[in-house]
């Protein structure tokens, strides 16, 4: 049996700056899990980038196309799911950004979001049902079978 | 997480121009950061980005820094960073920004010759 505890579930309009509120609310929701300061900072950066990605590439910064956030604790791991309605749209390029190419003007200076996400959390994956796309961030929790952090 | 639009002030120390970055480095920081850099780069060969009082830095902020660094390389200007938190220092290492922009723990370490001058 998988024990799932929903720690938070909410949505916010896709507006510049709203990723900060998402970060605050997710950080509040996981407060009792004792992730540790460094891993919490990593999670916060990943949540901010996932939300920015959803608002920009999924919702086109349209306030009427909100992003949905779900924070779930399972045994031994924490999930943060960031969803938008851009399931049919292509994501920006994947893969590691090349800073040398960027400094040489051969690539745009941008394109760090997914790279940062993948380096901040233990696992990251994207699923889509054609309309809704979800970026799921996973952080392992210490504590084994009882799920205690 | 408190939000604060970026404010940048310039000062000179031991032949370098120090940009004190106060606030968030995100998409809203573009104009202030670029304007301060444009002022700093005139006639100077050494710029220090002081992150001691910087707050949130996101991927767009990193892109802004990459753009400054690209311009500085074209102009033969050295950019050094200092005052980064452990978290953002790690991000600068992961992104390899640190390979092209030395990171000092503090301002004394970022300004060539400043320490000697400070103690003289």
Image (cartoon, coloured by chain):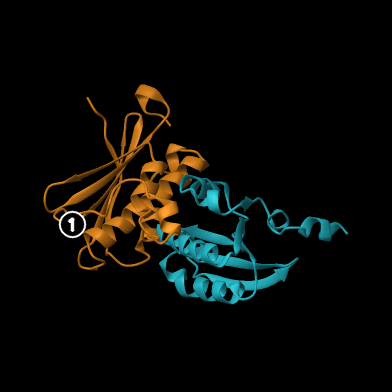
Which residue is at the front of the view, B51 or B120? Answer: B120
Q: Work out whether residue A28 can be spotted.
A: no
Q: Nearer the viewer, residue A2 or B27?
A: B27
Q: Which of the chains is cyan?
A: B
Please state the horizontal and vertical placement of residue B112, each as a whole percent of the image: 73, 58
Q: Residues within 10 Å of mark 1 (few under 14, many from 20)?
A: many
For this rendering, which residue is in front, A149 or B66?
B66
Quarter occupied by the N terminus of chain A = top left
Q: Residue at x 77, y 58 (%)?
A: B113
* Residue at x 43%, y 70% (from the top left corner): B28
Q: Identify the image quadrant of residue B119.
A: bottom right
Q: Position of residue A62 (x, y in %)?
A: 23, 68
Q: Which residue appears farthest toward the left when viewing the image?
A: A130
Q: Disc 1 marks which residue?
A: A86
Name the subunit of mark 1: A
Describe the element under mark 1 as helix, strand or loop: loop
Q: How many marks?
A: 1
Indicate the colour of chain A: orange
View extreme (right): residue: B120
The reply to whether residue A103 is in sight is: yes
């Amino acid at each position: 049996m998988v024990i799932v505890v929903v720690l938070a579930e909410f949505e916010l309009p896709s507006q510049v700056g709203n990723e900060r509120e998402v970060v605050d609310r997710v950080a509040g929701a996981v407060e009792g899990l004792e992730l540790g300061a460094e891993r919490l900072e990593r999670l916060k950066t990943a949540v901010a980038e996932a939300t920015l990605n959803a608002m920009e590439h999924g919702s086109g910064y349209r306030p009427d196309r909100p992003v949905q956030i779900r924070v779930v604790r399972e045994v031994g791991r924490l999930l943060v799911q960031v969803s938008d309605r851009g399931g049919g749209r292509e994501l920006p390029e994947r893969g590691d950004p090349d800073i040398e190419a960027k400094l040489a003007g051969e690539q745009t200076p941008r394109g760090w979001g997914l790279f940062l996400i993948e380096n901040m959390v233990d696992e990251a994956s994207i699923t889509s049902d054609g309309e809704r796309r979800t970026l799921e961030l996973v952080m392992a929790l210490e504590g084994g079978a009882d799920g205690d952090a | 997480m408190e939000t604060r639009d970026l404010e940048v002030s310039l000062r000179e120390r031991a032949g370098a121009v120090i940009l004190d970055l106060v606030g968030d480095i995100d998409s809203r920081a573009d104009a202030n950061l670029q304007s301060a850099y444009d002022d700093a780069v005139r006639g100077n060969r050494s710029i220090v980005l002081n992150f001691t009082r910087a707050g949130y830095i996101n991927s767009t902020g990193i892109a802004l820094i990459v753009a400054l660094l690209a311009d500085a390389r074209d102009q033969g200007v050295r950019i050094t960073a200092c005052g980064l938190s452990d978290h953002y220092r790690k991000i600068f290492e992961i992104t390899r920004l640190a390979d092209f922009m030395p990171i000092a723990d503090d301002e004394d370490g970022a300004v060539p010759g400043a320490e000697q001058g400070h103690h003289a």
